[in-house]
Image: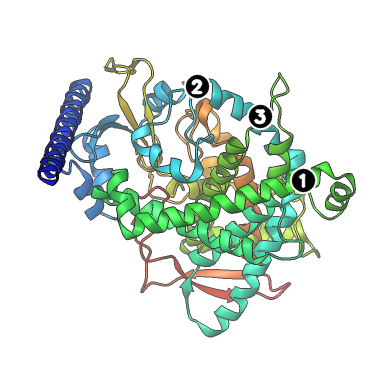
Amino acid sequence: MVPALFSLSLSCLGLWASGLILVLGFVKLIRLLIRRQFLVKAMDSFPGPPAHWLFGHSLEVQQTENLDKILSWTRQFPYAHPLWFGPFLGFLNIYEPDYAKAVYSRGDPKASDVYDYFLKWIGKGLLVLNGPKWFQHRKLLTPGFHYDVLKPYVKVFAESTCAMLDKWEEKARELKSFDISPDVGLMTLDTLMKCTFGKGHNGLSHRDNTYYLAVRDLTLLMQQRLETFHHHNDFIYWLTPRGRRFLRACRVAHDHTDQVIRERKAALQDEKEQEKIQNWRHIDFLDILLGARDESGIKLSDADLRAEVDTFMFEGHDTTTSSISWFLYCMALNPEHQDRCREEVREILGDRDSLQWDDLGKMTYLTMCIKESLRLYPPVPQVYRQLSQPVSFVDGRSLPAGSLISLHIYALHRNSAVWPDPEVFDPLRFSPENSTGRHPFAFMPFSAGPRNCIGQQFAMNEVKVATALCLHRFEFSLDPLRPPIQVLQLVLRSKNGIHLHLKPLGPGSGK
């Protein structure tokens, strides 16, 4: 009798649990439908392309990997249009400077529907923080990007780049052309390890290499997740092989960062150890974070320290890889500009083979070419916000608080109403005389407004050093059999890599 009652109780409990799950699922569905209605009504005055009832515009965007569909929509619908990722997630997609200014000159928070995917890895760092805590972190981290801190990094950038170029010397002898992107990615990750953790004096340890590989894994898995519609749900994603692999890589990254922070804190307590460290290395990003204090003398917590380190490693890796790779593609596509940049670099270097801090300000033509490359191939092609208050646009239309905004930087930079002949590579667009009077929100490779990229000067310096040394050592030309296929992901990349012919140049070759 007792076992029967026990079995009956379990059956009732199971039915009750199943009923509760159904009710909770129904409640969530109702909330999603209400939210969808809100977003549809908010964007009612903005016409746009028809959306699939289930996938929205996702399939069309994924199927046109060369981004022609996005650009055709921007020509068809001036200023902005609705963009749906599935049935419940809809953004107003904007690509016009005045529209960008209306939103990005304010401090609206990042759209959690997109950026919450990052939390498991990078935690609540600058990328995802909002409100007073974001302001506090921004203020504490700003000294870490002062030019006095950035100066010694030039040597780090040069060392890592030269190691990559030595590898390219061997590849160029064996291969007609090869994909430069993986090597550029390894180089940028190497510089970040050195600039963040002060690594590189005695080479990377096994633990550092494990972390190195985990970061590479995490960036790849993050990209793959954003592309996969049914992996947007956390519960489903963590059950998949990719989700479990992501969690394992997170543990490796977090364990490494935590241990480095503990060791550095202990070293800073020891005056002799501190003096020894200062004798062989520059101040790194971790030093800045550990010494940061607000007005009340309060330091960042260990969780905040780890979040900012992991954020810096994430944001500083793929973006600079994309910038450098696409720049070298632009140089291969435009040999006359490549020659002129190389002449400028060789004139600056003279008999030297290494770059110095003061050299960066002399690279005027190279800088114009870098900016034009960033215009055509912005490393972060799309960013997202959620309005904390209503916004009115120049044409009289408006959106209520709570609406979602997608700034399509790629489309903004190719908007023919803003940039004449937008597909043409013309670095003179960024000459002083041609830049005067340009709308401040027409060129946004590092976003703009109060939430612009805090590390943009760090990134520009690295791109300058790397590209200058690349042009000094090699002549780049296209592989016509393997043109790159642009893919609109979190970072702009090529689906099939960036394959170039590399011709080594001897010193004084004049090329």
Give the colouring mode of the picture: rainbow
Instruction: Give how far across and how far down residue 184 sits, in percent.
Output: 55, 62
Residue nearer the viewer, 265 or 495: 265
Q: Which residue carries the number 1 mark?
A: 266
Mark positioned earlier in the residue sequence (1 or 3)? 3
Residue corresponding to mark 3: 140
In percent of the image, x 40 and y 38: which residue is there? Answer: 115
Q: Quadrant of residue 280?
A: bottom right
Amino acid type, callout 3? Leu
Disc 1 residue type? Answer: Ala
Residue lying at the far front of the rendered structure: 1
Q: Give the number of the mark in front: 1 or 3.
A: 1
Q: Earlier in the sequence, mark 1 or mark 2?
A: 2
Residue at position x 79%, y 49% in the image: 282
Q: Position of residue 55 (x, y in %)?
A: 17, 44
Number of numbered discs overlaid on the protein picture: 3
Q: Which residue is mark 2?
A: 131
Give the left or right position of residue 68, taking residue 112 as reference.
left
Mark 3 packing: few (<14 Cα in 10 Å), some, or many (20+)? Answer: some
Dot 2 or dot 3, earlier in sequence: 2
**At x 80% / y 43%, what residue is drawn?**
268
At label 2, counting other C-alpha atoms closer than 10 Å, the crowd grade (few under 14, some 14-19, many 20 or more) is few
Residue 4 location, x and y as percent? 10, 45
- Name the residue type under label 2: Gly
Tell me the element at label 2.
helix
Q: Nearer the viewer, mark 1 or mark 2?
A: 1
**103 over 280 or under it: above or below:** above
Q: Is residue 226 above or below residue 105?
A: below
